[in-house]
Amino acid sequence: MLKYTLRRIVSGTLVLGIVSAIVFAIFYILPSDPARLACGKSCTPELVARIQVALELDQSLPIQYGRFIKGIFVGRTYLENTDAARECGAPCLGYSYQTDLPVTQLLVDRLPATLSIAIGASILWLLIGLSSGIVSALRRGTWIDRTSQGFALAAASLQIYFVGLILQFIFVDKLAWLPMPGYTSPFDYPLDWAKQMVLPWVTLAFLLSAIYSRLTRSGMIETMGEDFVRTARAKGLSSRDINLKHVLRAAMTPIVTVFGLDLGSLLGGAVITEYVFNIPGLGKLSTEAVTNLDLPVVTGTVLFAAFFIITANIIVDLLYSALDPKVRLT
Amino acid sequence: MSAFLEVKNLSVAFPTEDGIVQAVDSLSFSVEKGKTLGIVGESGSGKSVTSLAILGLQKGSKAQVSGEIWVDGNEIIAASEAEVRKLRGKAMSMIFQDALAALHPYYTVGHQIAEAYLVHNDVSKKMAAARAVEMLDRVGIPEPHKRVNDYPHQFSGGMRQRAMIAMALSCNPSLLIADEPTTALDVTVQAQILELLRDLQKEFGTAIILITHDLGVVAETADDILLMYAGKQIEYGTVRDVLQVPQHPYAWGLLTSIPRLTGDPSLALTAIQGAPPSLISVPSGCAFHPRCTYVDNVGAACASIIPELIPVSEGKHHSVRCHMSAKVREDIFANQVKPQL
């Protein structure tokens, strides 16, 4: 178990290295000059040259990459042995070309908004998705089942930017029940935070709960046909115990897996949701960075997202072995 | 005194897209406490459907169940799910064929036995867990206090079947239905399991229904035999009667197809010609007539009229569904079948 976890962490770290190398390489191939971009409007060739040196863009790609990796683990110093030397402590992901702020700082600043969206929405979609899926499975073929599954099919087919904008139009513009979505710290203004988060939560949960509802329903219906459920009935268990302890327990395993992966990728940035609702999270940071060819920020956000996805994968695999005793981790 | 289990005119039908499947058709039998009834038939003859009907497990499904099933004075078919639930596990319980599939993969064997005990007994979880160890010990699992925490997949096939038996017997049921409990097991384990069932029966006076397609198992274990074909009982009587003077051509076919140590090893085994019928289009008249070698002794009736279940001789607990007269059957058995046995 411990050995397995350690091995997964090592291989996960390797994957992160590969991801960062790929992002690095892509930007190197791109026909754009980061120094020119960082230079701004009133730019002279001398200035560009100076910036190139300052950003260490005059170095070869392997050297740049090597220094980047070193920065993450032990920190690095730009323009070493000059007056303009600049210390960047570990984990150093470089400085934004656009704002000149440390990328690590940017990521840490943007994380709370994304965390707020991801955690709130996931609680909501689990509640809605699981309960409607369970009810549908238990009342299979009735109008409750047909209504909820029809609704789920429709919801799963919709897109965030469509649902999000419609909800915003209704609840913010027309009815004025909610403020414009955005982010305020839940520690300073919890009520404002919640009010602003309601729409992103509902929009994300709307789509994802549809998937979870269908997943729960089909998983439970499939399990109900299993021999061990018949055994549970033959033992004289109540239908409540049969459905919760025997059916749902077995149907939960794949749902937990999907949930872990969904949450992991959402933590890397709810890109569309943040964009639609203009919420300063990691997803918005990464789209802005890509538009501006802000290489250090792009690399930082991609690595951050990859980190969450890989971590989620490891946790899911560990959870899986806890949920299913047949799975042995080696 | 009436029997502990009394089944009268049981019929079970399943509506399907291709038509109604009559899985069990007007079945009647009874089992007394301490006795064993062997239900024998090939796949699809309605053995398992019958056992599920006795436990009332078709309630809530599309199955159409009619007739009467009396368990210890309680009628099952008309009863509500809640009423039958109280009987399941306690008055009657069941050992399923495929123990690996029939045990929950995510719970320990001990948990599953304790769960069965907890439903019907007002005891603490600790006492139920102790009961699980006791039951595992009872069915001959070595180191039960350790194995109680194993998951079903960590048990061998024979141990899993024992665990199923332990679970089924945890509440000392008066009726135990064993649906092919030894089919998937090798012969030595099979013998151990049957021995175990016999011991437990002696100890608790349990009525047992043993469902199997193995006549040898029945001969060894059962008191009565019920022979099923295409959902109908075609012969019913004591093991002694049915195996020594079998009446139905199907029974003759089954008995002559058994390989014998004294037989000539160079000869091919005798087989019943043809294949078991589909339950969607059961042959008219006697369902066995397309495969029966003795149709010529009767004529047209075999293909058109369903034979009644009639006692072999007046007042005897041995009945058969066959158009041939008792005299004809006697002759055929004595001259053609017996020499082969």
Image (cartoon, coloured by chain):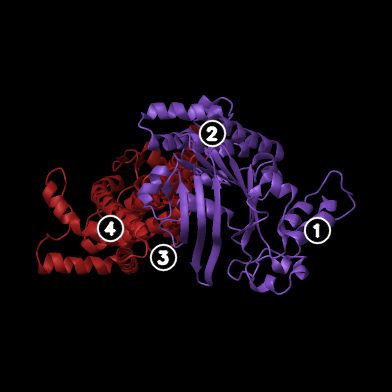
Instruction: Measure the alpha-carbon separation of dots 1 and 2.
Output: 40 Å
Left or right side of B167 for B237: right
The residue wearing badge 4 is: A205
Residue B331 circle label:
1
The residue wearing badge 2 is: B205
Q: Are marks 3 and 2 on the same chain?
A: no
Q: Which of the two discs, 3 and 1, sits closer to the camera?
A: 1
Q: Are marks 4 and 1 on the same chain?
A: no
Of callouts 1 and 2, the N-terminal one = 2
Query: Chain B: what color?
Result: purple
Q: Which amino acid does label 4 sit on?
A: Ala
Task: Give the percent coordinates (x, y) of residue A175.
Answer: 10, 67
Q: What element carries label 1?
A: helix
Name which residue lies at 34% across and 67% down.
A153
Q: Which of the two discs, 4 and 3, sits closer to the camera?
A: 4
Which chain is rendered red in the image? A
The residue wearing badge 3 is: A31
Instruction: Measure the alpha-carbon separation of dots 4 and 3.
Output: 40 Å
Q: Which of the two discs, 2 and 4, sits closer to the camera?
A: 2
Q: Do labels 1 and 2 share a chain?
A: yes
